Image (spheres, grey):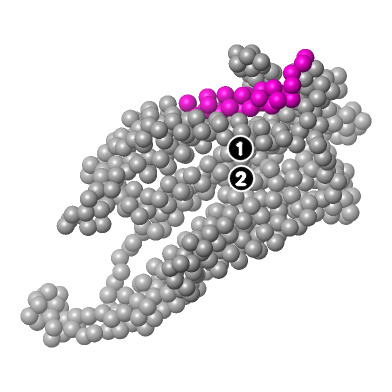
């Protein structure tokens, strides 16, 4: 098959296929913008050390996250983490209109295309859509640099618009994301057989998912808890720092993966309980769907649960900094001094909270796409139920139960694991004993070196230790926001139910 024909066939299709291409391009653009921002932060040059600037800070920026060299790596890493919900959104967009696409691919097979050519068609469709998104993101990034390059009254910049990442790095993002998207499509199509009679899978799931995800969560949290004290040198020294880093990163990722995959077991178990105890037709319909495809919840809630876990960890970290600030004030009060406000850490956590909110919005968008895709993909089944006398309200309630019931325990699990990881990250707040020189005289006497020593006494403060409070209020707001997002997406998705259950759908192929 020649490349022009391959490109023309990959972009052919209905309005649903066009919507899928546009949504995939939009997701790729968001991921590329996050990657460009991370590269921009890493491209900030570190000045040479001088007597006035021993810390080698970049004083042209207004925020410490950009000024201090030691904080830029964490800022870039946080920006990269924002691509996780975006990529999950791209995965949901790729499933939009899947039945119609499967019939189109089967028609290509009937016309003489080989399985490999059909796979390449799907890869080219995803790759072209992603390339369109990354090119758009590159244009927006370059234009945004010029528009946002506005120093404040002190001549400082809010964003690093004075530097540009290396052209090779930008090109790697523009080309690499579509390439990864195409390869991911080929990987997802491996268990699928495209025949002239339709699309089938190599193996069907006969039993529900096992609760092995719980063991993965426990192992991940345990590795994180064990690895962090080692990393800080509390138990062992140098040679084991690399192992500790593996335990920390691997433990955190394992716990996150366990939460996402555990949503499948939660969905299946919820379906079993509904089938056993429910009496309402909507609940029974939801139970059947949850048991027949429990992994649908894992796919739909993946980005949402990841964002909730990260947000719970950020809430625990905020509680640590609040407790640390309180101990510093107590220590200063004992010494007879006064500590001013130092909002750096709390303002930094506020930026993290903003990133979590953005991730929740993106995850809710992916969930909306999943709900709409589920309604459109099963429109003939829903239409048959409506034609048989099932009210559309009952179908709507079944879709709502199917989305909300697994979400509640999954969000609670994500909040718990995120809080435990955040609590284990720093542990208790400890302030060691310190000595202070306190001048007990007037300001004029204390300012004179000749008379200050006569009125100065040495004060020693005892070591202080405090356990950070569990941020119940922030966790409740985070969980309520996630569930509100689920309800909102379900409500918007149900707007497509009436048009998707028209009796004409029974005559479509």
Answer left or right for 299 relative to 157.
right
Residue 317 picture location, percent across and down:
48, 61
**Quadrant of the image containing the N terminus:** top right
Which residue occupies 16% across, 57% down? 51
Label 1: element kind? helix
Label 2: element kind? helix
- State the count of labels: 2
Q: Which mark is residue 89?
A: 1
Decide: few, some or many residues near mark 2? Use Cα within 10 Å; few <14, some 14-19, many ≥20: many
Instruction: Find the magenta span and give its range.
Output: 111-135
Q: CA distance from mark 2 to mark 1?
A: 8 Å
**N-terminal label among 2 and 1:** 1
Which residue occupies 79% across, 43% down? 293
CB under 8 Å between callouts 2 and 1? yes
Work out whether residue 503 can be spotted. no
User: Is residue 448 within the magenta segment?
Assistant: no
Q: Which mark is residue 303?
A: 2
């Amino acid at each position: 098959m020649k490349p022009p024909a391959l490109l023309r066939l990959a972009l052919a299709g209905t309005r649903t296929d066009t919507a899928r291409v546009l949504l995939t391009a939009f997701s790729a653009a968001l991921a590329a913008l996050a990657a460009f921002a991370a590269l921009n932060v890493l491209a900030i040059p570190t000045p040479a050390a001088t007597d006035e600037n021993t810390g080698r800070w970049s004083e042209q920026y207004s925020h410490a996250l950009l000024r201090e060299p030691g904080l830029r790596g964490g800022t870039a890493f946080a920006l990269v983490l924002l691509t996780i919900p975006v990529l999950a959104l791209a995965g949901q967009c790729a499933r939009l209109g899947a039945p119609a696409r499967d019939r189109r691919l089967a028609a290509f097979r009937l016309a003489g295309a080989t399985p490999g050519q059909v796979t390449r068609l799907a890869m080219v469709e995803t790759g072209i859509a992603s390339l369109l998104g990354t090119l758009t993101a590159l244009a927006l990034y370059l234009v945004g640099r010029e528009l946002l390059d506005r120093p404040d009254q002190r001549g400082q910049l809010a964003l690093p618009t004075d530097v540009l990442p290396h052209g090779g790095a930008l090109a790697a993002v523009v080309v690499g994301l579509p390439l990864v998207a195409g390869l991911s499509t080929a990987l997802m199509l491996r268990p699928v057989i495209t025949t002239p009679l339709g699309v089938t899978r190599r193996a069907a799931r006969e039993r529900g998912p096992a609760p092995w995800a719980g063991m993965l969560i426990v192992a991940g949290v345990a590795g994180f808890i064990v690895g962090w004290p080692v990393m800080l040198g509390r138990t062992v020294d140098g040679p084991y720092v690399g192992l500790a880093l593996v335990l920390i990163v691997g433990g955190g990722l394992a716990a996150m993966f366990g939460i996402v995959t555990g949503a499948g077991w939660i969905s299946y178990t919820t379906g079993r309980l509904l089938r056993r105890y429910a009496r309402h037709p909507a609940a029974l319909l939801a139970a059947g769907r949850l048991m027949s495809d429990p992994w649908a919840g894992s796919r739909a809630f993946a980005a949402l649960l990841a964002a909730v876990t990260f947000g719970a960890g950020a809430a625990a970290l905020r509680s640590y900094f609040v407790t640390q600030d309180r101990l510093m004030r107590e220590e200063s009060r004992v010494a007879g001094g006064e500590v001013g406000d130092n909002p750096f850490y709390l303002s930094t956590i506020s930026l993290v909270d903003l990133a979590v909110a953005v991730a929740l919005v993106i995850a809710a968008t992916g969930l909306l796409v999943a709900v709409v895709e589920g309604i459109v993909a099963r429109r003939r089944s829903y239409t048959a139920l409506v034609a048989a006398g099932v009210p559309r309200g009952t179908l709507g309630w079944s879709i709502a139960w199917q989305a909300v019931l697994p979400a509640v325990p999954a969000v609670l699990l994500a909040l718990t694991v995120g809080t435990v990881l955040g609590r284990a990250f720093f542990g208790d707040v400890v302030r060691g004993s310190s000595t202070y020189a306190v001048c007990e005289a007037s300001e004029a006497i204390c300012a004179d070196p000749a008379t200050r020593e006569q009125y100065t006494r040495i004060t020693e403060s005892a070591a202080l230790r405090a356990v950070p409070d569990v941020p119940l209020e922030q966790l409740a707001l985070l969980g309520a926001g996630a569930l509100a997002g689920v309800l909102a997406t379900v409500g918007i998705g149900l707007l497509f139910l009436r048009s998707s259950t028209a009796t004409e759908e029974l005559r479509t192929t």
